[in-house]
């Protein structure tokens, strides 16, 4: 960031301490369009519910609206020229972020609308993956962040709007670490399996998790976001509280369904005269959509055709009114969609039209509010069945306009509004038969049921209107920012976050990471009997995820026998190292140390003699290649003598004696241990020059793991688990819970390089 930017930001931050908190709204578009007329700009106010909702909130609190003014600026123009000049009485200022024609094409039209839009709506076949558009999306988001940093202070609440600016919080957090930042996503948030298709999905998630609050249209979308935070970034997620912890700070993830200005629609509807119901006037069924493939207009028209085939008695009695608002008319895909809709309407009208009646009234143009309200009032049925929608405010507008409560709302269960509007007749928009049945049900529904459903819907929409949405979201965002700052301070020095910060740049420098985990005391807590050290469901799930993560190599290293550790973990496809490295088995590797056969007799004889020791609580574990004497359950006063006696037996049979946590072990007396085994696995799996391509990380808790720590010194990294002690490890974690938290981060592959 240049000196001028830094200076402007410092001026903003040095404002009077008594200044009240303002609202700083950041959106792709400003609430008006700037049009150059000669050497000056003219400004045309933008319609829409978001503008109508946010302008009053900005006016009350004072603040700034930051966005692109709609003009493609290849020629020189200052940001100040592209917004209306401020008046002394205004509490709202505007900041333009100019975009060139190329940036509009790549950031907005390409990445935002041909990558994110279809992907987030589950249209994977329409999703375009292009690195050039991603790079421009990044650059534009960084520019928006710089403007936001200049125009805001740490006292303000920055409210970022929608999918075009998902990377902005990441950049803003680096420029202004203590900003209070909230984000609202107006479109659906997809599941992990869908989002992972995008090569830059982790980058988008990092952007969102730099917010204090992320708002979604529905709880389903919020749940998806939390799941992606956990699986893609290894964030620690508390689903009951709706919080994801990442890089030492919490992000609240909440459902805040957007709404409409109910009173405005209610008043407008009261002014519109509605023709009285009579037998001669056809019943109207209304659909209102922007022309977009997510709205399912061709699928709806197939249902209309099927309806008249199944219920011919409604021919001449029912009219479907399809209002399509033009959208992205220059985009080839949208031109093709219009052609399909035009042909479908023509075909259906051609089949069924009779004596002045046509089944479909097709309107392709923009409508003002009075015209829309009139259509809403006239329609007996509102058929709102998009294939996928973040919310769909048309459904709420239809409800608000039904002041007599006579209409029936048919609503797609794939729309975010379905989570709120339970009294609607809900349908799967892909199920033509179900949609046909719902239309018939709406037409024959008794008046009492119609009124009951509609009155309940009107109450829902009236009490949760757009003004309450703004107030509720802002209140929750400020609470999350205040709580998050305190929580971040508490967690900033947390051991897992400290380890992650040290590991991230180191791991990101190589394409492959080899992860070595000890079992007892590392992946599972130490227990009195080894057979009770059962791997938790969480640890097992994360290991399975790590196994599926590209360029991760997972190895379990244990003093247990190979068969025992393989059985305890129970995940095929991992590499298992047993008996402190004497046995190794995994994809492409099968190793038994040559010394095992030579010393097998000595190990068996030592085990037999050890079994004759009669000390309460002592027991002998035969592991084939080695033998272990466990003394954890021996009384304190008798433990040390028991250990000395066991060691004496092992030495008498010429075995090497090692001691661990309440265990004495006998192994073949050769120079081989976990450290040599780790290097052997790395060389076999990745070649003798593995250091140039692989990062190796070993996590263990026992004395025997120190051999691995020493072997990797200068070649890899190591982590000691447990209380502070003298160790060869580079880092430390306090317990197995911290190991599992780190495993989640590693399993997500979230350590890949991020620009910020």
Image (tube, rainbow, N blue to C red):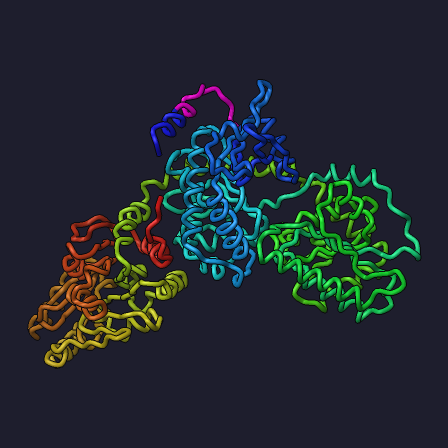
Quadrant the C terminus occupies: top left
Q: Is residue 137 shown left or right of residue 273?
A: left
Decide which of 129, 175 is in the foreground and name it.
Answer: 129
- The number of callouts visible is 0
Q: Is residue 246 shown left or right of residue 526?
A: right
The residue located at (52%, 39%) in the rendering is: 72
Q: Residue furthest right?
A: 279
Camera sees residue 64: yes
The residue located at (73%, 65%) in the rendering is: 303
Q: Which residue lies furthest to the front in this view?
A: 38
Magenta region: 11-22
Does the magenta run of residues contain 701?
Answer: no
The image quarter containing residue 91 is top right
Decide which of 7, 552 is in the foreground and name it.
Answer: 7
The residue located at (26%, 57%) in the rendering is: 510
* Residue 10 percent coordinates (x, y): 38, 25
* Residue 285 percent coordinates (x, y): 79, 56
* Residue 7 percent coordinates (x, y): 37, 25
Quadrant the N terminus occupies: top left
Camera sees residue 413: no
Q: Is residue 558 above or below residue 270?
A: below
* Residue 649 percent coordinates (x, y): 10, 72
Does the magenta run of residues contain 17?
Answer: yes
The image quarter containing residue 44 is top right
The image quarter containing residue 699 is bottom left
Chief secondary structure of the magenta portion: loop
Decide which of 615, 737 is in the foreground and name it.
Answer: 737
Q: Is residue 611 shown left or right of residue 137?
A: left
């Amino acid at each position: 960031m240049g000196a001028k930017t830094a200076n402007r930001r410092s001026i903003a931050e040095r404002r009077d301490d008594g200044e009240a908190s303002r609202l700083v709204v950041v959106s792709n578009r400003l609430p008006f369009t700037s049009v150059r007329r000669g050497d000056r700009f003219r400004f045309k106010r933008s319609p829409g519910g978001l503008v109508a909702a946010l302008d009053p909130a900005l006016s009350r609190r004072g603040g700034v609206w930051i966005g692109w003014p709609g003009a493609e600026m290849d020629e020189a123009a200052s940001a100040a020229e592209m917004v209306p000049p401020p008046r002394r009485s205004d509490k709202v200022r505007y900041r333009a972020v100019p975009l060139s024609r190329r940036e509009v094409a790549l950031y907005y039209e390409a990445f935002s609308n041909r990558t994110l839009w279809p992907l987030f709506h589950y249209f994977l076949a329409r999703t375009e993956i292009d690195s050039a558009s991603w790079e421009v999306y990044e650059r534009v988001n960084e520019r928006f962040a710089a403007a936001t940093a200049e125009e805001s202070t740490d006292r303000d609440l920055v409210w970022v709007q929608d999918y075009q600016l998902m990377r902005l919080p990441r950049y803003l957090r680096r420029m202004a670490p203590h900003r209070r930042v909230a984000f609202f996503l107006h479109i659906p948030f997809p599941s992990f399996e869908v989002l992972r298709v995008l090569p830059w999905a982790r980058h988008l998630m990092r952007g969102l998790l730099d917010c204090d609050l992320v708002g979604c249209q529905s709880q389903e979308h919020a749940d998806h976001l939390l799941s992606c935070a956990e699986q893609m970034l290894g964030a620690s997620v508390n689903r009951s509280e709706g919080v994801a912890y990442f890089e030492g700070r919490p992000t609240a993830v909440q459902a805040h369904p957007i709404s409409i200005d109910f009173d405005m629609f209610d008043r407008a509807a009261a002014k519109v005269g509605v023709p009285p119901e009579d037998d001669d006037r056809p019943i109207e069924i209304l659909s209102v959509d922007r022309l977009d493939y997510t709205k399912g207009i061709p699928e709806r028209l197939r249902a209309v055709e099927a309806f008249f085939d199944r219920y011919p008695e409604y021919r001449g009695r029912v009219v479907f009114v399809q209002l399509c608002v033009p959208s992205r008319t220059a985009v080839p895909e949208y031109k093709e969609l219009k052609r399909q809709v035009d042909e479908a309407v023509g075909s259906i009208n051609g089949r069924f039209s009779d004596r002045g009646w046509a089944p479909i009234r097709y309107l392709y143009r923009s409508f003002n509010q009075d015209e829309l309200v009139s259509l809403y009032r006239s329609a007996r049925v509102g058929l709102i069945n998009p294939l996928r929608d973040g919310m769909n405010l048309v459904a709420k507008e239809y409800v608000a306009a039904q002041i007599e409560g006579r209409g029936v709302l048919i609503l797609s269960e794939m729309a975010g509004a379905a989570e709120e509007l339970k009294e609607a007749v809900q349908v799967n928009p892909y199920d033509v038969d179900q949609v046909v049945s719902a239309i018939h049900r709406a037409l024959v529904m008794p008046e009492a049921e119609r009124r009951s459903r509609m009155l309940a819907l009107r109450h829902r929409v009236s009490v949760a209107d757009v003004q309450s949405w703004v107030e509720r979201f802002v209140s929750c965002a400020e609470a999350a920012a205040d709580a998050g700052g305190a929580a971040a301070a508490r967690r900033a020095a947390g051991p897992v976050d400290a380890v992650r910060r040290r590991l991230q740049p180191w791991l990101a420098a190589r394409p492959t990471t080899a992860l070595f985990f000890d079992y007892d005391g590392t992946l599972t807590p130490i227990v009195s009997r080894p057979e009770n050290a059962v791997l938790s469901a969480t640890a097992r799930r994360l290991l399975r995820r790590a196994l599926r993560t590209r360029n991760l190599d997972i190895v379990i290293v244990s003093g247990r026998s190979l068969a025992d550790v393989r059985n305890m973990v129970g995940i095929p496809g991992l590499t298992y190292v047993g008996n402190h490295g004497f046995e190794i088995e995994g994809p492409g590797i099968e190793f038994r140390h040559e010394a095992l056969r030579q010393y097998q007799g000595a190990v068996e004889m030592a085990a037999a003699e050890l079994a004759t020791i009669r000390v309460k609580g002592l027991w002998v574990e035969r592991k084939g290649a080695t033998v272990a004497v466990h003394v954890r359950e021996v009384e304190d006063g008798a433990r040390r003598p028991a250990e000395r006696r066991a060691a004496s037996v092992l030495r008498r049979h010429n075995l090497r004696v090692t001691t661990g946590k309440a265990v004495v072990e006998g192994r073949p007396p050769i120079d081989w241990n976990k450290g040599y085994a780790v290097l052997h696995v790395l060389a076999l799996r990745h070649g003798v020059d593995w250091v140039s391509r692989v990062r190796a990380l070993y996590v263990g808790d026992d004395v025997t793991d120190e051999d691995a720590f020493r072997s990797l010194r200068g070649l890899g990294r190591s982590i000691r688990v447990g209380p502070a002690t003298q160790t060869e490890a580079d880092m430390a974690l306090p317990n197995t819970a911290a190991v599992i938290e780190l495993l989640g981060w590693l399993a997500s592959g979230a350590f890949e390089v991020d620009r910020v």
